[in-house]
Image: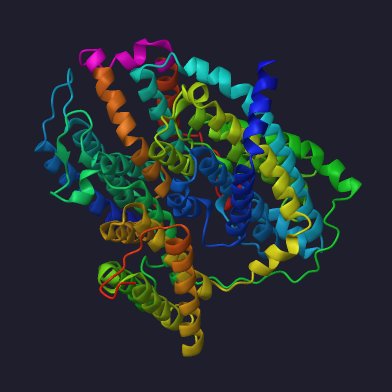
Amino acid sequence: MDLLSNLSLAFSVIFQPNNLLFCFIGCVIGTLIGVLPGIGPVATISLLLPSTFRMSPVSGIIMLAGIYYGAMYGGSITSILVNIPGESASVVTCLDGYQMARQGRAGPALGISAFGSFIAGTVATILIMLVAPPLAMIALKFGPPEYFSLMFLGLTLLIYLASGSMMKALMMACVGIFLGTIGTDTISGIERFTYRSYTLMDGIGLIPVIMGLFGISEVLLNIDEASKQEIYKTRISNLLPTLRDWKDSVLSIIRGTFIGFFLGILPGGGATIASFGAYAVEKRVSKHPEKFGSGAIEGVAAPESANNAASQASFIPLLTLGIPANVVMAILLGALMIYNIKPGPLLIKNHPDLFWGVVGSMYIGNVMLLILNIPLIGIWVKILKVPYPILFPLILLFCLIGVYSVNNNMVEIVIMLIFGIVGYLLKKFKYEAAPLILAFVLSPLIEIALRQSLLMSHGSFSIFFTRPISLILMAVAILLLVLPLIPGLKRPPKTEEDIS
Amino acid sequence: MKRHDQMSSLVWLAFAIYICIASSRLSFGSFHNPGPGFLPLLVGLLLGIFSIVVILQATLSGKPQENIPPWYPRERWKKLIWVLVALFAYAICLETLGFLISTFLLLVFLFHSGMEPKRWVVAIGGSAIASFSSYAVFELWLRTQLPKGILGF
């Protein structure tokens, strides 16, 4: 009965005309930036964040969520047609999707990825409805030590799953935490590392840092590398997969959905890891693994379902625990705080319209995306042809306006540009920016939880290991940190080379 | 990667030393009641340790130098520097010149001498359209307060 009343609340929120409109705008923008290489969901969401301040929080989050899962649909289009992933969660789709396109089967590849995403999105929405409320109930029992351990685990997972050196990922997390301490200390009110700058007194803003690290640096890298892209010239026909295609891929879609959902819930997990995981599993269970990499439809269906399920599941830790699972969720956490909504276990209880409205919008959003992607595929292919030399000044302009409009402060533009250069150098030297951002966002929360825990325990770190929930979280985190040191154990594959 | 790791970790080590020195000026407090300098000092120390480990790993790994591309862009570095100079100039001039003029000038520069030079007509026309339409959307429609500048628009 509870579920039914929640469902009706969800639909009453999403069917308000303005929420429908913003859900639609989010889906369109998401598909658009998914199609355009060189700008991903992270940069876009941070770009558009300031424009949501005038909306209601519900509409704002609905739109930003739409951008995120919309990008998962759009990203597959470029992977299949151009062999360039529109964003990182579609990297693995290139392997078989592009091969299918070369064999003249671009239509079924695009079709199955849209249908797979739709099925996965629908299932994920239902699972969120079932899983999230009980999880929030458990989280109500959390005290500062549990929160500290949970955030520690989240960071550790992201570090463990980092694609490069784990040591470097640890360094990035340290830098992120340090950057987060800049500004006025919330407990003592003492200024830290501000050098009397008014801008720094409130801390370094999340938006300039993210836009610098993910927006500006991406443009700088593209100027530097200037990839020439060629669209595979093929007539896209028969978008509807045949009965045989369905038979081949229906189990892959189901497996992909569940793998994606569970990897998406984990803090530190997310769409990219889910898509690689699903691909690896498909290859292992397949009766003809040799076909993978040369146009197997399972190799498109599974990762595309997984990334969509994961992108939706990653809302669970944010909305129930207040812990962002990945960078996009970190930005949304920042958004919630700006809207003056305290994320955490009480969010579902205090703001039911926000939680159920966002969940409901995911379902409607998936229907919209299916319509946007199947009949209107031709439009997106045309947009793919916009050359980057024309695109990049406009991306830069959006970053500049976006950052300036948050506080009308030009110092923040300078901060963004500095982080743009830093992000460029990090990529060149093979450091990952994701642990840095997650640590940066979590830093104030981690610090408060740590200092409160130590106050509670009179200075003993054993408090994290004597309370049962905290002990389990800590044990998993420490296991993850120690595992790579054991010889013979390899970390799971994350990169294209690892998979093939 | 060897040289790159040594270089970059040295920079991080220097940064770690800065964090430690700067945070030791703040009150560390005690484990019973940690002060504002507690966490920064902790992560500063950790960052220092990790960067030393990476330096050691890179130095001790006996792998021969692989053929890796240099970290700076070889052919396009001039373009990259110019784009950055233009962006910093934009940040500095924005409040004096106002949004419309500075955006127009920035875009003309980026279109005309960006990645692939466009003809003047295209650059000026495109910049005019882009700056006016963004002005319309952000200032007139969304009411973002873009800087007016000395000329008042």
Where's residue A418, x and y in %? Answer: 30, 59
Residue lying furthest left = B25
Where's residue A182, x and y in %? Answer: 23, 42
Q: Quadrant of residue A363?
A: top right
Tell me which colouring the rendered structure shows. Answer: rainbow
Q: Judge whether residue B145 is colored magenta.
A: no
Where's residue A27, x and y in %? Answer: 63, 50
Q: In percent of the image, x 44 and y 68: which residue is there?
A: B135
Asked if B31 appears above or below A259 in the picture, the reply is above
User: Is A308 on the left or on the right of A317, as rendered?
Assistant: right
Asked if A33 appears above or below A115 in the picture, the reply is below
Q: How many numbered dots are placed on residues in this image?
A: 0
User: Is A355 on the left or on the right of A51, as rendered?
Assistant: right
User: Is A99 on the left or on the right of A194, as rendered?
Assistant: right
Where's residue A429, x and y in %? Answer: 37, 57
Q: Judge whether residue A458 is colored magenta.
A: yes
Q: Quadrant of residue A381?
A: bottom right
Residue lying furthest right = A243
Q: In percent of the image, x 31 and y 65: which residue is there?
A: B147
Span colored in magenta: A455-470
Report if residue A164 is visible in the image. no
User: Is B73 on the left or on the right of A382, as rendered?
Assistant: left
Q: Quadrant of residue A83?
A: bottom right
Q: Nearer the viewer, residue B24 or A196?
A: A196
